[in-house]
Image (cartoon, helix red, strand yellow):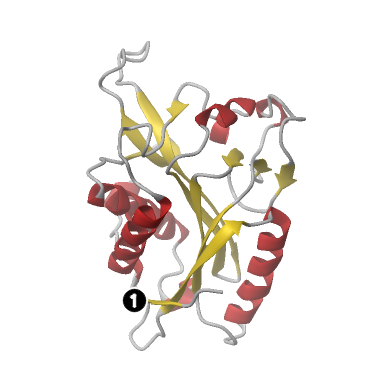
Amino acid sequence: MKRDEISPQFLAASGSPPVEWRVQSGLADYEAAVAFMEERVAAIRANRADELVWLVEHPPLYTAGTSADEADLLTPDRFPVHRTGRGGEYTYHGPGQRVAYVMLDLKRRSCDVRAFVSSLESWIIDTLAEMNVKGERREDRVGVWVVRPERANMPDGSPAEDKIAAIGIRLRRWVSFHGISINVEPELEHFSGIVPCGVAAHGQTSLVDLGLPVTMADTDLHLRRAFEKNFGPTVLKNP
C-alpha cells in the first residue's frame, strides 16, 4: 500500500483526553529538549501525563538520525552536531523553523508506523493548504515537497522541487517522540552544511521563500487546526 492510500486520520480512541498543545517562546536548547521528551514519553507510557505536541525553535544546529551517513556532514565545524535516536539522516534546525515535537500514544490510536508517518505528512500538507501552498508526498522520500514550476526541470525531465518540511520520529513502547519541522523563515543557506535527509538533488524552501508574508504565530494557528483534523482535539497549556 502506498503512503497516500492510507487513511489520513489517526484519531484517538473515544474518551481519550485532548492532546496538550504547548508553544515554547525563545530558542530551546536541543539537549534539554530531548531530555524533556524522554521524561514526558515515560510519563505518557505510565499514564501519568497526557499526550503532547510541543512547538519550539532551536538555535542553529545539525542533528544526525539513526541512518545518517558521515559523508553527508559537509561542514562538521559549522554548527553543533547532535546525535539523536530518531529515524532518518542529517537535518538542520534553526531560528525561523517551526519544530513540532509529537508525543502520542499509538496504542490509543493505531500501532501502525506507516499510517502514523502518513498522518504526519497529511498534517503538514493540510497546514500548508490553509496557506494556499500545495505540499506533496514522494514515495521515495519522506517529508513534504513543493514543486517549483518557475525553474528548469530536473535532468530526468521531472519538475524542479524543494523540501519545505521534514519528518523524523522515534517510538518507545508505541509512544512517539521527535516529530516534524516546517520551514517558515529560516536561513536556507544553513542547509548547505549537510546533505539534508541524504537527498542532494533537490533544494530547500520556506513559506517566506515562496512569497508568503506569514509569521510563526500564523503558522502555529494553521498547524493546530490541521492537527485536530488528523489527530483529534487539543488543549492549550503553555509553560
Percent across and percent down for residue 27 are 61, 54
Residue most toward the right? 77
Above or below for 81 versus 151: below
Can residue 69 be seen at all in this image of the molecule?
yes
Percent across and percent down for residue 9 are 30, 64
Please state which of residues 173 and 228 is positioned toward the viewer in this rendering: 228
Residue at 31 percent across and 16 percent down: it is 151
Q: Is residue 155 left or right of residue 193?
A: left
Percent across and percent down for residue 91 are 59, 39
Residue at 41 percent across and 32 percent down: it is 205
Q: Is residue 186 left or right of residue 92?
A: left
Please state which of residues 109 and 232 is positioned toward the viewer in this rendering: 232
- Looking at the figure, which quarter contains the C terminus? bottom right
Residue behind mark 1: 233
- Secondary element under disc 1, as helix, strand or loop, is loop
Please state which of residues 212 and 152 is positioned toward the viewer in this rendering: 212
Percent across and percent down for residue 169 are 55, 55
Above or below for 145 versus 116: above
Residue at 66 percent across and 46 percent down: it is 66
Can residue 89 be seen at all in this image of the molecule?
no
**Residue type at the position of mark 1:** Pro
For the image, the number of numbered tags is 1
Please state which of residues 148 and 68 is positioned toward the viewer in this rendering: 148
User: Residue 11 is drawn in which quadrant?
Assistant: bottom left
Crowd band around label 1 with a 10 angstrom C-alpha radius: few (<14), some (14–19), many (20+): some
Residue at 41 percent across and 85 percent down: it is 17
